[in-house]
Amino acid sequence: MGEQQQQSAALPRGFQWGAVKAGIKASGNLDVAVAYAPRGANAAAMYTKNQVVAAPVTVGRRHLASTGGRVTAVLVNAGNANCATGQPGIDACLRTCKAAAERFRCIFDEVFPSSTGIIGVPFPVDKVVAALPAVQAALGETPDHAELFAKAIMTTDTKMKVARAVIDVDGTDVHLFGAAKGAGMIHPQLGPPHATMLVYLFTDLAASPASLREFLQPAVERSFNSISIDGDTSTNDTVLLLASGASGVSLDDRIGEAFANALELVCGSLAHQIIDDGEGVTHVVTLQINGAETYEEAKQVAKAIAHSPLCKTAWSSADPNWGRLLAAAGYSGVAFDPNRVTIRIGDQLVFENGVRAALFNEAAAHEAMSAREYTIAIDLGEGEAACTFLTCDLTAEYVSINADYST
Amino acid sequence: MGEQQQQSAALPRGFQWGAVKAGIKASGNLDVAVAYAPRGANAAAMYTKNQVVAAPVTVGRRHLASTGGRVTAVLVNAGNANCATGQPGIDACLRTCKAAAERFRCIFDEVFPSSTGIIGVPFPVDKVVAALPAVQAALGETPDHAELFAKAIMTTDTKMKVARAVIDVDGTDVHLFGAAKGAGMIHPQLGPPHATMLVYLFTDLAASPASLREFLQPAVERSFNSISIDGDTSTNDTVLLLASGASGVSLDDRIGEAFANALELVCGSLAHQIIDDGEGVTHVVTLQINGAETYEEAKQVAKAIAHSPLCKTAWSSADPNWGRLLAAAGYSGVAFDPNRVTIRIGDQLVFENGVRAALFNEAAAHEAMSAREYTIAIDLGEGEAACTFLTCDLTAEYVSINADYST
């Protein structure tokens, strides 16, 4: 038994995917997608912790609660977030679920809705409903179908984001496939039950909603909850894990660790793809915070740096201005003694004992930061706790993407 | 008795100002400045709450404590922050104080040092010490002298920042003059005793250090502690209020309110000038948060919006994408019911009852946001508390200023 990331075509059985162009995106691209489990699937989800949540988040949460975690169809649109749309938005979402339930012959509550796009604009419910027959006709089980699904959910993303893993259980393959979207408004803070990061994870393992939830939470904490592009937490962030059971293999103690690893692999890959495709990103930076008293404090330091415009702009020009890193750690709210801190950029030691490292080589640090991807390691010298956080630079391109009059 | 903002030349008596070019700024501009009180002045100060503080902040705090709040000379340099420079940085700072004390014939602790500029680069102590005779020779009491002081402390500032007020006390004028610098790394969080925002306030009122402190704190809370350009809190932020007593008028109950008003007027003006001259700023936005349960919660909502890259980039293009405002409020950590929230941009109602306002006029909102300066008012509908917070847009120019290899 072992798991591996697999580039091959193998997808979890028990699911079909499809997508069509419904005229919601101004670009005219694919914008309504469905993932369909003909025999249903058990489900666990995590949603944004934003106080303001979109209608589909409210409805999806209610549906999972009322079915005890059963999903037959996932209905996603891109181009309109159906957020800050009040009761009319809820009503519109319910209408799309009702239409999908009729189309896919399941009970109403087994439709799980998701939306991503602009906030505050009335939801184009008629376009979604009208697209359903064509989406149904487009459904299929091949990698091409799964990729259409992954493409349709994109908004400002420039690349489709998918990841796969396979676990060999005594000769039987258990599959895991994930599709994600997200490039801006990315600082997911997902809580038990809470995305405009949308992540859909499909497996043909057999597992109860409760055990899916138990596996999903730590995987999300170390992946999607440990990334930030701009510090803006969306009103629509959702991670949904579906298990069709079609492999015939049950999630038990024997394969728990392999499944946890596979889930971590797929979530980690998708989280990395999201940062790598972040709006205007030219550098992907891993913040490795060590020597903290607690994991939470390590993460608090990482977030202060990841959200500092001065750190992020310095990264965009490969400027080894480490004083900005230290200043951001300093205002994070975490107590530490600057004299015990060490800072490394790549394998360059740049700061220790309260001063610039004796061997600090600005040209070498600049060189290390010129790579598309590198690590900044900060040891606070206070304790044993650590965290790894993935973020990116802030460029004029990010500003221009988001200053575009109404995106 | 009344106070007024005065464009005239009147400055507080009992002070002299001067500045010279010491070769610390790469530009070759004025970079070492002194404010000198020949008979000394009582003082109160507030400093950054950043865990990492520059050497002059450590030394300045110690000096005020040991003298019980007496200052004879303020010695400021721009171009090097003397931060993250360890014990050598402290020693360098002490050497400049010692040299200044000899030059200005005061006890060592009555020299108050400040630095602003790059972090982590060894402090050019010899340049500062060598500049002292020339600074002393340059001292004078005229507005031109005060303006040289204000110019020398600038770093990425494009404009000198000064403000004045006069209080007429039974025919005697009491003067207040303030000089400030700051354009980036601006999100001051000043606490009793903590800048790279530097603010120096001079008055010829007679007042004890304790009563100066009592007046300074509320004025700073409503001005410098209620502004943000980029959310980065500096390691060097300092506000220093000096009272020479040269007017012969004492701070007592009779003039307390007038002095508080004058201080608020001057601090408010300087805070506004800092935002207006923020790096790359094209729009100054006042966030008026009403209907919060507490002042702290109102401020927390204001800060989430002021630090949201998505809100700030939308402002740069006058994009009335109010959904981003609501989303940022939603992740601020403050609990509220979105259905009770109203949002106004200028005098346009854009959001109420959980949905886009019926009369929302996108063109009119865009028009309102095209002004250099406007107000966004958000009522949370939860309570009676309010705050006013001043911030600005995020532009490609900000990115380019801060991405410049080593500023």
Image: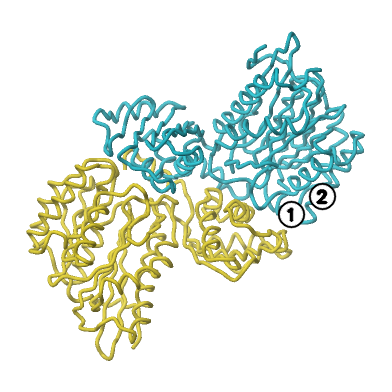
Chain colours: A cyan, B yellow
Residue extending farthest to the top is: A171
Name the one closer to the observer, A272 or B363. Answer: A272
Q: Which quarter of the picture shows residue B43?
A: bottom left
Depth order, front residue of B100/B116? B100
Q: Which mark is residue A92?
A: 2
Kindly identify which residue carries mark 1. Answer: A85
Residue A226 spot, x, y in % from top left:
55, 36
Q: Which mark is residue B318?
A: none
Q: Residue at x 34, y 47 (%)?
A: B52
Total numbered circles: 2
- Residue type at mark 1? Thr
Q: Chain of mark 2?
A: A
- Picture coordinates of residue B362 (x, y %)? 65, 59
Quadrant in which the N terminus of chain B appears = bottom left
Closest to the observer, B37 or A88: B37
Lower sequence index among marks 2 and 1: 1
- Residues at discs 2 and 1 in contact (Cβ within 8 Å): yes
Quadrant the C terminus of chain B occupies: top left
**Dot 1: chain letter:** A
